[in-house]
Amino acid sequence: MHVPFSANTRRPSSRTMLKRELITNLWAYLYLGPMLLLVFTFTVYPIFASAFYSFYKWDGIGQLSQYVGWFNFQSVARDTFFWTSVVHTIIFTVSVVSIQLTLALILALILNNPRLKFSTFYRAVYFVPVVTSQAVIGIVIQLLLTTSGSQFSDFLTNLHITSTSIDWLGNPFWAFVILIIVGIWNYLGSNMINFMAALQSIPVELYEAAQLDGANARQRFLTITVPLLKTVGGVIAILAFLGALGTFDLIQVVTNGGPFYATEMVSTYIYHKAFGGFGAPGISGSPNIGLASAASFIFGVMILGLSAGQVVIARNAARIRKEING
């Protein structure tokens, strides 16, 4: 039966609909409340506070009084130690991520084999470092290299692998190499698990069909595994890059940016500028929260630029592939 429209049969207003939606999902918002509060307190608020502090010279104690405008940004832009730390951070990140993702994919392919025995045990062994504090790992590495490093160096010398004894943390080159090795080992298990999850989402029927068509293991990997891992692999790579760029605990504990600022990263540079202390020559000194905030914003803009460039390159590559296939 057709009911004629009248003024009394009006649709509820947007405000009424919003109120109903809030009441319906009240428990969901209550559960999200503590997380949102923590995100606002420890992420959103510090970002805006840091932007405000970057225009002041402030040691973190007392009231903000010495306004310096853009001087902090100019000082950071002219600081050779900052740009050196940027170069170190890029080298560290590229080295760690490229080697780590390669090893993680190889391990994922091996451990994803259903015929492998004790695969669960191996997964746990590789994943243990992920749930271990980087500060604890750094202390252990430092103690090992301090107490047993000379014996290991003498062992390499006796085997004629090295010609002289190596001061692992006192040599700029080897200190950087050690940080890269430990960084690779620390989060290798996390990326391995992510790749395993992606591999297990690929239908087994595709491999069986390719095998029936005569494709060998290498051909199945290149024609099935690699194309279907591209999307997930891109996400894993981005997360790995962001994690490596923000590495701080490990570097601070093991080398403190030394020796001779050879392992100074942007994260430790910002820490030394903010809190002073005994860091690399020319970097530490009296605390200056404003200068550290300016450095963090400059580096943040650089990361955003790199991320935007990656998105543009990925979209252009997808468009070109579509045109070729279409």
Image: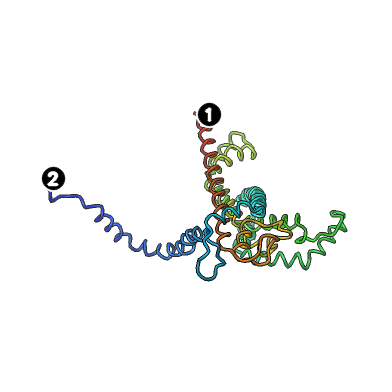
Q: Residues within 10 Å of mark 2 (few under 14, many from 20)?
A: few
Q: x, y (%) of residue 304?
A: 53, 48
Asked if residue 188 lies left or right of residue 177, the reply is left
Q: Nearer the viewer, residue 233 or 6?
A: 6
Q: Quadrant of residue 145?
A: bottom right
Q: Quadrant of residue 172?
A: bottom right
Residue with the mark numbered 2: 5
Q: Earlier in the sequence, mark 1 or mark 2?
A: 2
Q: x, y (%) of residue 75?
A: 60, 55
Give the Cα distance between marks 1 and 2: 55 Å
- Identity of the residue drawn at 55% across and 68% down: 60
Q: Amino acid at mark 1?
A: Ile
Q: Secondary structure at mark 2?
A: loop
- Identity of the residue drawn at 73% across and 68% down: 143
Q: Nearer the viewer, residue 78 or 178?
A: 78
Q: x, y (%) of residue 150?
A: 81, 64
Residue with the mark numbered 1: 324
Q: Amino acid at mark 2?
A: Phe
Q: Nearer the viewer, residue 117 or 144?
A: 144
Q: Quadrant of the N terminus?
A: top left
